[in-house]
Image (cartoon, helix red, strand yellow):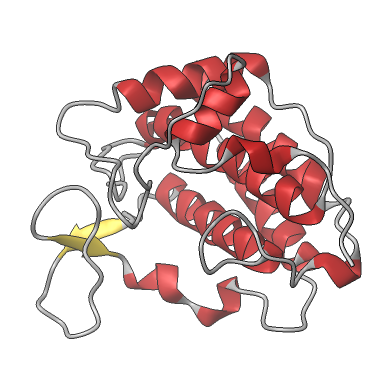
Amino acid sequence: MVSENSRAFVTALFGFDAVVQRVEPEQWDLPSPCEHWDAREVVNHNIVMAHMLLQMTKGSSAAVPTAGGEREVAAPHGEGYVLASHLFNRELRAGREEDPTDLWNQHRDRLLHALDQPGAVDAVARSPWGHSTVDEFLGFAFYDPLVHTWDLATAVGQRLHLDPQLVDRALEMLEDPGEGRNLRQPISLADAVATTAADATSRLIAATGRNPALSAPRLHS
């Protein structure tokens, strides 16, 4: 069953995909507005997110109780929870000098197929931010591919137009992410930056700690 949350997420996902498909092979090493990430790493992150959501539709939580291991990474919501080990599979990342498009296409299609299955959005699986069902998480996670669409387009100099309804929804969610959910931490969002821009997209980008002035298309040498 298609829900409002899944529709928002899939709309954002296709927006991100449209940018991925237009990246030129020589552009993957270009720096993005995400610190320490080039264009390739922005796509790698979204591949991991697609894998995570696919696993959640199967009831596999992305945040699990800590067992006290040395390599555990704390989940961003809830003491005593760490990120599931399957999120650190090296096969989820395109390596240096590799074009990530094919890997992205595979995980995009697998996720879309999984979300189409009966009961997928109702599956119970804990997200890193404490959501208990896939549908709850989709209503939160849609902002991730939405904002990374801007990151990738900015990195490679593409013009883009973010869905205005999703932008408004993302702004509302960032103002009220839900009880106990702190987004302002390294694993999720940097502190907001000041902006005098009036348009909603620029305000959203500033709210995620990015400089909206970077969005003007530019030529790369």
Number of numbered discs overlaid on the protein picture:
0
Q: In this view, does 210 lie above or below 136?
A: below
The image position of residue 136, as x and y in percent, is 36, 29
Image quadrant for the N terminus? top right
Q: Which residue is drawn at 77% across and 83% down?
A: 97
Residue lying at the far front of the rendered structure: 196
Q: Which of 80 and 23 is in front in this view?
A: 23
The image position of residue 25, as x and y in percent, is 89, 69
Q: Which residue is drawn at 79% across and 33% down?
A: 160
Position of residue 177 in the picture relative to residue 108 (left or right): left
Image quadrant for the C terminus? bottom right
Residue 134 seen in the current view? yes
Q: Residue at x 34, y 43 (%)?
A: 191
Q: In this view, does 152 lie above or below 136?
A: below
Position of residue 149 in the picture relative to residue 118 (left or right): right
Q: Nearer the viewer, residue 79 or 187?
A: 187
Residue 119 seen in the current view? no
